[in-house]
Image (tube, rainbow, N blue to C red):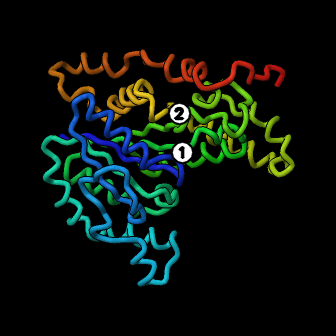
Amino acid sequence: MVFGQIVVGPPGSGKTTYCNGMSQFLNLIGRKVAIINLDPANDSLPYECAVNIEDLVKLSDVMAEHSLGPNGGLVYCMDYIEKNIDWLEAKLEPLLKDHYLLFDFPGQVELFFLHSNAKNVIMKLIKKLNLRLTAVHLVDAHLCSDPGKYVSALLLSLSTMLHLELPHVNVLSKIDLIENYGRLAFNLDFYTDVEDLSYLQYHLDQDPRSAKYRKLTKELCEVIENFGLVSFSTLDIQDKESVGNLVKLIDKSNGYIFAGIEASAVEFSKIAIGPHDWDYYRVAAVQEKYMKDDNIDFDD
């Protein structure tokens, strides 16, 4: 049984940096890691990848040969990968014995909530190679400073969760830069727990561009809350404690935490439903470290 992560998220959310930092951390704690680059447009990798999809298909070649733009080219590339899944499986098989896998996917969000190619590739690998994978969906933390962008990030996260149908962890990446684009209207746990979005309405109404879409925004927020699936962990990829706390959650979601345990179903259940001993570090400690003390406006 092989464990790993599917790393997805919008462009600029830090996927490649995440794979680089996560692989270094996992190596430090004794795991043998293999990074698989499945982004045919990523030609400047900061890490050494075990499998590089550019050996099979390259976005620049596809765009030139078929007169496609970058978005259409990426859809074509993912379709090409699906049709040549045997090539990818053959590249991965030597890694299955003792490696933890990190899959670095493209940043085109349509691939993960609209088109089926990327999902088909993932599901075929899971079924054929007996993989246990968690989808790690990165969202740039600075989006929390803009209510409209934050709602968009919630919709994207929910759509991706429903489309991929995998164990899923949403992450506010670059948490150390969260207030670089402005102070937040609420405490950090408001944005991580996603429990009452009605409080965003006042701040959305202050923006003339958002005010005219008030009813639509309200309905979208209700959809997100009714599903009740989206919440966020936080990450500063340069902070070992932050990475370690995220690894605990991912290990629980894909089953890695149970891999070396010889126990009954009852014992497994006790571990699975155990409390989050890292919850303080997920929110409170992060707020203390990266956010100003005076950024909360209780009158709102």
Tell me the amino acid under the disc marked 2: Phe
Q: Nearer the viewer, residue 103 or 195?
A: 103
Residue 137, horizontal then vertical, whole percent: 47, 44
For residue 84, which quarter of the picture? Answer: bottom left
Q: Residue at x 38, y 39 (%)?
A: 21
Left or right, 102 with reference to 242:
left
Left or right, 283 with reference to 222:
left
User: Callout 2 environment at 10 Å: few (<14), some (14 to 19), or many (20+)?
Assistant: many
Residue 54, horizontal then vertical, whole percent: 32, 66
Q: Nearer the viewer, residue 128 or 68?
A: 68
> From what the image shows, is residue 26 above or below residue 151?
above
For residue 59, which quarter of the picture? Answer: bottom left
Residue 276, horizontal then vertical, whole percent: 43, 18
First in sequence, mark 2 or 1: give its number: 1
Q: Quadrant of the N terminus?
A: top left
Left or right, 9 with reference to 188:
left
Disc 2 from disc 1: Cα separation: 10 Å
Left or right, 204 with reference to 194:
right
Q: Residue at x 58, y 28 (%)?
A: 193
Q: Nearer the viewer, residue 228 or 61?
A: 61
Pointer 2: what residue?
232
> From what the image shows, is residue 282 above or below residue 37?
above
Q: Nearer the viewer, residue 250 or 240?
A: 240
Q: Residue at x 36, y 30 (%)?
A: 247
Tell me the amino acid under the disc marked 1: Ser
Q: Are marks 2 and 1 in contact (CB under 8 Å)?
A: yes
User: Callout 1 environment at 10 Å: few (<14), some (14 to 19), or many (20+)?
Assistant: many
Q: Secondary structure at mark 2?
A: loop
For residue 52, which quarter of the picture? Answer: bottom left
Pointer 1: what residue?
157
